[in-house]
Amino acid sequence: MANAATAVHRSPQKALPWILTPVLLLILSIGLVMMVYLLMPSHKLQSYLNLAFMDSLKVTSTTAGLNIVNKDIDTGDQRPTTDTGKIITPKFGEQYAKLVCDDIALTVSVYFGTTKELLALGACQSTQSAVLGNKDNVVISAHVNTYFADLDEMETGDIVVLYTEYGKFTYRVKEQIRFPKTDKRYIVPTGTDRLTLYTCEGDVLGDSDNRVGVICDLVSKEYFVPADE
Amino acid sequence: MNRPITYLCNVIVTLLLIFSLAATAVLSVIQCYSLRADTCIALLGKHQLADRVYDNLDSYYHEQANTSGIPASVYMDSISKEQISEIIHASVVNAFAYLHGADTMEQVETDFSKLEENLISFFRTYAEENGYEKDAAFEKTVDTAVANAKRNIMTTADVFRFYTLYDAKVLDKARAVTPLVPKALAAGIVLTAVLLGLLAWIHRKRIYQMLYWAAAAMFAASVLMILPMTWINGTRWFDRFAVKSDQIFTAVTGYLYGNTGMVLMIGILGVVIAAALWIVFALLHRHMLQKQSA
């Protein structure tokens, strides 16, 4: 019996391989998975994932929600400016610009992203359009019954200025537009510096199937010189 | 421990078994959970999706009343949460039927006669009170309002966006893969059985030792599943989902977290089974040593 006990209670050195083998197997299998992941051409899948699950869109609650960030953007900013500068890409739900058109006495906050909640707060920029400063179509919309009620009064030649924390962007109205709501030609990327503003066509009865707005050409881009320069 | 050559054979077979077990477990989750309409239907009640759709429509039509002049009650009095629930249920059933081989994705049929009646009645009363002529343009406005309302309700109730995915041909891609899942699962089960058989053959003289290696494979495969799923659930990774409409966000993330939760559960079960196998092995091993010493 004593011999049996001695045999069972073997030295720790002999027990070690039994304990370490599962750990070794686990490390090996994790290594293999990582190797396959790195070797696999996953960039296409990654880009789809990045689109569907944007880091900046994360909400902390278990239900949908928005991180609405309100900012005090100064339309009278007197900081010196330059022709080039750093563009700060806003996060979804962030108020990142102020749109001013003195010709129709319009001043409205611009939020990045278009949702019911943001449309209640101001004008909304489509996240699929260019961030101010980038060379492409900047598309901004708002409700006709609130912020863009007088948009149809904007005329060719009127000046529209967009103020951000990093610069001031001036546009001139080129033409007025009216298009069916299913027509995407005015809101897609154009590759040129352009501002498109639109809203629903005012309709007393029934849902409006048309949109009205303006297309503006860029007049100037002015970036604020950072304080430390 | 065994001789080096036997040990190496055990390591290689066990490594293969780890991936075979992990793949089989994940495929079984896909086959028995992800690809079942019941999974999505269960979310209907769990997350009150019909209520969310109803509230979304209510809020939308209240907001639209400012511009359209049509009171929200004209729409909302003609639809019920039960009807919305039926639409969601039917769209899920149709989508999974298409995924599993139906020729086309059937459109959901629902009774909108009350909605039509309410809208037409509202428009006629409005026209009479305000002296509008009921000409062709008037009839067209009525028809447009009815058609838009139907489309809007159907689109809002498509909480999993199945019809959008169908239109974008994304479901077609999923449909091409769906029949491969049971075949891959069968292959995984056969491969696992073969590898276990191989382990049994290696340990044919001391068959109980096979338990140790099978448990090691089960443990590593489980950890391989648990680690990423814990990270996804712990960081609430799916909360980054781009579509923020309450009902869509809740439905889609609920489905995704359901899947990760299921894989996590199987992983934890795997660790428990591995621990049980190791205990059985240790007892048998001890018994054998005692027998040899005696």
Image (cartoon, rainbow, N blue to C red):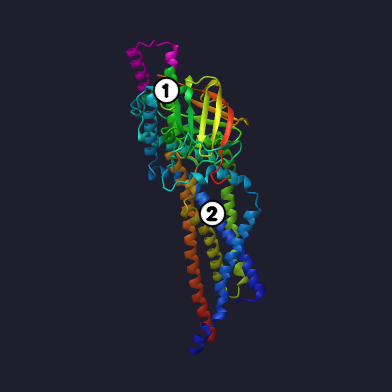
Residue nearest the viewer, comparing B241 with A227 = A227
- Closer to the camera, A3 or B230? B230
Residue B194 appears anywhere in the view: no
> Is any atom of residue A51 visible in this view?
yes
Q: What residue do we see at 55% from left, 27% from top?
A: A171
Q: What is the spatial separation of the Cα atoms under label 2 and label 1, in whole angstroms?
A: 46 Å
Q: What stretch of residues is rendered in magenta?
A: B117-140
Q: Which residue is mark 2?
A: B26
Q: Is residue B70 left or right of residue A220?
A: left
Tag 1's secondary structure?
Answer: helix
Residues packed near mark 2 inside 10 Å, few (<14), some (14 to 19) or many (20 plus) = some
- Chain at tag 2: B
* Residue for point 57% across, 80% down: A13
Residue at the farthest bottom position = A2
Residue on which disc 1 sits: B146
Q: Who's the residue at 49% across and 48% down the image?
A: B238
